[in-house]
């Protein structure tokens, strides 16, 4: 389905990013995997992708940093013959009520979630336009659609990602590049596993399907948007939330 394509995935070393990376590898894509912290975890994902037949290289980068992002994107375009798919998945949270939230926590979350998506889109836009089927998939959140107490920074960033998605979709459509967003709800990951039981119970009762989603369910949606099957879809936000945000 994605044979001969190269996908860049940010936040690729764990959770949803890891699931996306391996799903794209199974579909035939080669991978440029961006990670912020654990080189060991990123190399583990590379190893798994290579077992699936993919070329996979990891790159450390603070996606919120313009210069670092540009240097990594330049390296990717040197290491791979094409860049066809960009998945802006890197994310961070620093939750607090608005009356207690620090400027530093607000800026940090906006930087990773929103500016990071801008940086990689900006630096890889020309490479994606050279592809015969450029695809940008941004991972947003239902928090960006409906807000969430204690997440003013995260909700604002994810709402910004939706606005960025729609604008990029309009700007790059003439060059055959599509840009869509995926909005997960409660997804079972290492992060949600550590949530208090009361929050887990709420996730089940508030979600019409009465369960958390899996990272693989998000990844399969991303793979669809990266494929030729989605060639006439752009500027869309697809919720993978079990009906939470209906």
Image (spheres, rainbow, N blue to C red):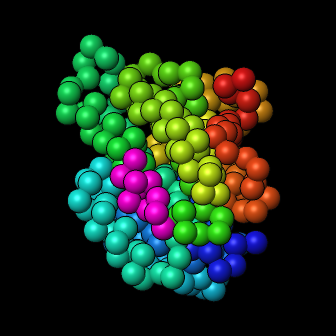
14 drawn magenta: no
Q: Give the number of callouts.
A: 0
Q: Residue at x 67, y 25 (%)?
A: 245
Q: Is residue 84 above or below residue 87?
A: below
Q: Is residue 209 above or below residue 205?
A: below
Q: Residue at x 76, y 72 (%)?
A: 1
Q: Is residue 94 visible?
A: yes
Q: Residue furthest front?
A: 174
Q: Residue at x 68, y 27 (%)?
A: 244
Range shown magenta: 118-127
Q: Quadrant of residue 109?
A: top left
**Residue 86 placement (x, y as % from top left):** 53, 60
Q: Which quarter of the rendered picture does the C terminus lie within? A: top right
**Residue 217 placement (x, y as % from top left):** 70, 51
Q: Quadrant of residue 150?
A: top left
171 left or right of 100?
right
155 left or right of 246?
left
Q: Observer-nearest residue: 116 or 150?
A: 116
Q: Is residue 34 above or below residue 198?
A: below
**Residue 145 placement (x, y as % from top left):** 57, 26
Q: Observer-nearest residue: 191 or 93?
A: 93
Q: Predominant secondary structure in magenta?
A: helix
10 left or right of 98?
right
**Residue 20 placement (x, y as % from top left):** 59, 61
Q: Residue at x 33, y 37 (%)?
A: 110
Q: Is residue 108 above or below residue 82?
A: above
Q: Is residue 201 visible?
A: no
């Amino acid at each position: 389905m994605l044979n001969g394509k190269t996908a860049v995935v940010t936040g690729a070393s764990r959770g949803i990013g890891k699931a996306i990376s391996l799903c794209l590898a199974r579909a035939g894509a080669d991978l440029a995997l961006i990670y912020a912290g654990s080189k060991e975890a990123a190399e583990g994902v590379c190893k798994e992708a290579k077992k699936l037949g993919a070329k996979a290289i990891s790159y450390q980068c603070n996606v919120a940093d313009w210069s670092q992002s540009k240097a990594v994107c330049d390296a990717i375009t040197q290491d791979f013959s094409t860049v066809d798919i960009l998945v802006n998945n890197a994310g961070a949270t620093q939750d607090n009520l608005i009356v207690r939230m620090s400027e530093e926590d607000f800026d940090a979350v906006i930087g990773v979630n929103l500016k990071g998506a801008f940086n990689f889109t900006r630096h890889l836009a020309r490479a994606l336009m050279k592809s015969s089927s450029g695809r940008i998939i941004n991972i947003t959140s239902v928090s960006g659609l409906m807000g969430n107490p204690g997440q003013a920074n995260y909700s604002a960033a994810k709402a910004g990602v939706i606005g960025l998605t729609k604008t990029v979709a309009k700007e790059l459509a003439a060059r055959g590049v599509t840009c869509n967003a995926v909005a997960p709800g409660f997804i079972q990951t290492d992060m949600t596993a550590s949530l208090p039981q009361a929050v887990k119970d709420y996730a089940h009762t508030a979600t019409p399907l009465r369960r958390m989603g899996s990272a693989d369910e998000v990844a399969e949606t991303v793979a669809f948007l990266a494929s030729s099957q989605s060639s006439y879809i752009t500027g869309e936000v697809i919720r993978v939330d079990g009906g939470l945000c209906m």
